[in-house]
Image (tube, rainbow, N blue to C red):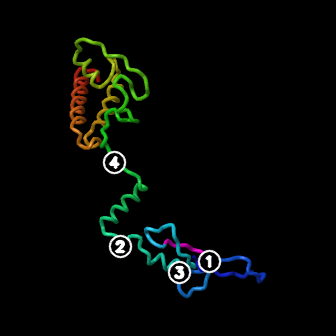
Amino acid sequence: MHRQIEVEFETGEASAEAQRCEHDGCRAQGIYRAPKARDRLSEYFWFCLDHVRDYNRSWNYYAGMNPEQIEAALRCDTVWDRPTWPLGRWGATRRIFGAEFIPEDIDPFGERRPPAPAGPKSKTDQALAELDLAPGATVDEIKRRYKTLAKQLHPDANGGDKSAEERLKTINLAYSTLKNSAAV
């Protein structure tokens, strides 16, 4: 398939075969490979150093592609040809580590949450429940939980999901209630 010539070593023996440069008229040893085409990247021409440099200068991977095809190829190469999704497309509520399949009474780390007590609640207790905190939560716990939920439910992280936006409004209202009740 490739043209090969015998190379004589210092001993004068023709003991090894070497690849000859595939450039027309060149008799040098072809030890540098260059791909034959964009769709045949595992098939190579074999050139000497001077001719492989010439080949690389003139070779255009994107030759024959329209601008849309070039853009698509660049986007695939940017992410190592792996699928990607916009941030927040799948929603941020209970979707960490596949948590969308976890029942409501179990947190993502497998611990069972205590059932909520039945009966009427004060506005402060309702606000704490909205933030998924137990009564008697500290100021730091309330702030930390609010910041976490606000980041998860932010419109930029959810791609315009209306349910997340409504949930963020209730979280903001609950936090405001706790701030006004001097709990925060």
Label 1 sits on residue: 19
Work out whether mark 2 precedes mark 3 in sequence or the reverse, and give the earlier one.
Answer: 3
Task: Tell me if 148 is positioned left or right of 11 in this view.
Answer: left
Q: Report the side of 81 relative to 9 (left or right).
A: left
Foreground label between 1 and 4? 1
Most extreme residue toward the front is 1
Label whose residue precedes the other's in the sequence (4 or 3): 3
Which residue, given by chain and number where applicable, does mark 3 sit on? 51
Q: Which residues are magenta?
A: 30-35
Asked whether the beta carbons under mark 2 and mark 3 sit within 8 Å of each other, the answer is: no
Q: Quadrant of residue 166?
A: top left
Q: Which residue is mark 4?
A: 85
Total of numbered circles in the picture? 4
Q: Earlier in the sequence, mark 2 or mark 4?
A: 2
Q: Earlier in the sequence, mark 1 or mark 2?
A: 1
Horizontal side, residue 57 vs residue 25: left or right: left
Question: In percent of the image, x 28 and y 21: which residue is there?
Answer: 129
In the rendered image, the vertical position of residue 45 relative to residue 177, given as above or below = below
Binning the other alpha carbons within 10 Å of mark 3 as few (below 14), some (14 to 19) or many (20 upward) gives some
Q: Mark 2 and mark 4: span between their CA atoms?
A: 29 Å
Determine the secondary structure under disc 1.
Answer: strand
